[in-house]
Image (tube, rainbow, N blue to C red):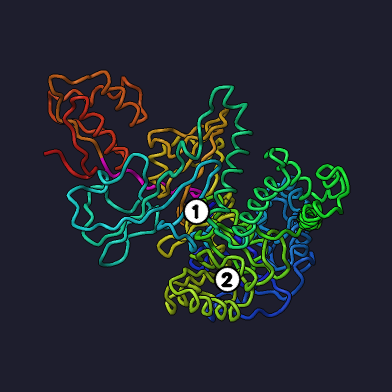
Amino acid sequence: MDPRSGVILICGLGGLGQACLRTLIGFEAEIHCIDQRQPRWVDALLADQYGANLLIGDMRSPQVLRMGRAAEARAVLLLSHDSAINLEAALQVRLLNPKAQLVVRTNSRRNLERQLQQRLPGLATVDPSLLTAGVFANALRTDGTEAAFALGDELFRVRSRTVQRDSARDLFDLLGRRERLVQWVPAEGSPGGAPASQWWDLDDRPRSGDRLLCLELASTLETRPPRRHRLRAAMAPWLHRLDNLTEMVQRSVRRRDPLLLWGCGLLLLALIAGSSAFGSGSAMGGLLLTLALLKGEFLDSVGFLVEDNPMATDNLALAYLSLLYAVVGTFLTAWLVAVILDRLLAQRLGRRQPRPLPAGSQYVLLLEGGRLAERLASLLQLQKFKVVRVEPDGSGQAYTQLDQAQRALRRSSCQAVGVLGADLVDNLDMALELQERWPGVRLAVQAQSLADGAKLSGLFSDMQVINPLQVAADAVVATAFGERVRGVLRLAEDNLLLTDYRIEPGDTLVGLSLAAVSGGYGLIPLQVTPLGQRKPIVLPNLERVLQHGDALVVMADLQALLAVENGTLAPPRWQLEVRGCRRNCNGFEAQVLLARYLAQAPGEVGRYLETAAGPQRTKPIYQAPGRLLQQGLTRLGVECSLVAAAQTPA
């Protein structure tokens, strides 16, 4: 059955529900809706197209669900703001329809959600704010890259490359083996298709002003160091502690806090003066007595210094100096105890003041946001950005007020601000105020009440207005069709989904090469984990064939994922024309190479090298593996070229 067809029931027509309706426009599916009250339609087109199929009632009621055709639906989306209502409705739907795909919106970390997802097949929970955290993270990036995301231990980046002059090389030659082209944006006109859809011709040459979005693997040996010998492994924890101590000292020096510098200077001066005054010719003895006095030990120290009457005229000055040192030491000890007690109580109560940043450092500021800000901070910190959060309730390691954060960070530089509150007007007010205070700072503003935040972004420079519900709609719809979406990226005004596949018998992907998956469905394979292996293969070779049990992670838009679900594979449009072999041709290696790329037995491809009767053409092949095959055969001494499948030999 076409994944676009069948009955789909959407329960809850808030911002996310209406965004999903907008995504489903043009699908052949029959859409029915349930809401507890008449929704406030964002778009009149949605009201005209789906208003007749709207049922007012409680989604937890079995009678209402039956009237909404939940018993025969292929997918049910439960998208109200209340997670408890969504979960209760999911149980009722499962009783009515054991086969429907259930998508449940959640905004909490309940153990029940995890248990239901494990025990009830076909049930998936989604949190729109967490699902779209990567979109906000990319909007706040200040390193010049378009996007970045992590898959396990690997970090990927999407970089924008602007062509300065007409290229003498085609797209295939411009890309490295560890790069994948995500989108080609011509200087004039619009792209010919969606990002990652492989719509371009690799034989074309970019012109001046064209922009290429290229995916690359950012992980290196620096981020993933190899395992050293046993002695180094045993010393690693101690070396790590030493590095932390060194970094703390360097950070204190770079910060150049006047109070800290004065305090260290006075302490050093007190130690030198005390060693001289109390040493009686022994510097070490004087240093030990000075440390004892600074600890608050007055009587024992004075008794050691002055064995007879301490109040004698000759000893009075020394006694007063000792008293001064002891008083200062008492205050110093009390201050240390207070600091330690504050740290212990803060750790016990879960409220700790954020650690100040080094002077001159750059940071990203996140205002409010709750779980979204928490997830966003972890993503940015994973990519080596310094993050400062402001939360009114002080949850986590965050400042409670913006003024408090600004005072603590007055010697640091803010590069980007994420305004993540729930109210659009308050967010814009805060964003414009910060933009006036810090000209040139990047801004990302959350706007859940807007149907299309991208249009508002055009009104303000250096500001992106992002509606997470609108961005998450593609992921929710893809999940309703059975996909396992782990994240969303937004590139060139389009949403790309990072999706997991587990290759099963009868799957539309089983037995296909990654070249067919990439060129036929229009997506980018990111990782393949073969059955029985734990370490994934990153940016795998296109000639690899998917087998039962393999795990695959791809980057694609919603249309490509639906094509995979439906099995609508675009046929290959190229053939390799073999014209002959040079004298130094390695026929055996050439035969093996042909067999690998064409997924045929070596004995079946030998005829392609027999060119006595004229040029021979292989079976159709996709362009990217065809160019790689042509490149490999040319190195082996085979004269060949890649031609269009409809073209006749010369």
Say which quarter of the image contains residue 275. top right
The residue located at (40%, 62%) in the rendering is 492
Res. 273 visible in picture: yes
**Mark 1 residue crowding within 10 angstroms, few (<14) / some (14–19) / many (20+):** some
Q: Nearer the viewer, residue 58 or 434?
A: 434
Task: Judge from the rendering whether residue 467 lies leftward or rightward of residue 159; answer left or right.
Answer: right
As drawn, 361 above or below 593: below
The magenta region covers 563-574
From the viewer's perspective, is the residue at label 2 or at label 1 nearer?
2
Mark 1 secondary-structure assignment: helix
CA gap between label 2 and label 1 equals 34 Å
Residue indicated by mark 1:
562
The residue located at (87%, 44%) in the rendering is 308
| Residue 302 highlighted magenta (yes or no) | no
**Image spot of residue 441 (x, y percent):** 46, 70
As drawn, 596 above or below 276: above
Of the two numbered discs 2 and 1 on the same chain, state the one appearing first in sequence. Answer: 2
**Mark 2 residue crowding within 10 angstroms, few (<14) / some (14–19) / many (20+):** many
Residue 29, disc: none
Residue indicated by mark 2:
419
**Image spot of residue 181 (x, y percent):** 35, 50
The residue located at (18%, 44%) in the rendering is 647
As drawn, 177 above or below 533: below
Type of the residue with mark 2: Val
**Image spot of residue 524 (x, y percent):** 42, 47
**Image spot of residue 254 (x, y percent):** 52, 55
| Residue 568 highlighted magenta (yes or no) | yes
Q: Nearer the viewer, residue 506 or 127?
A: 127
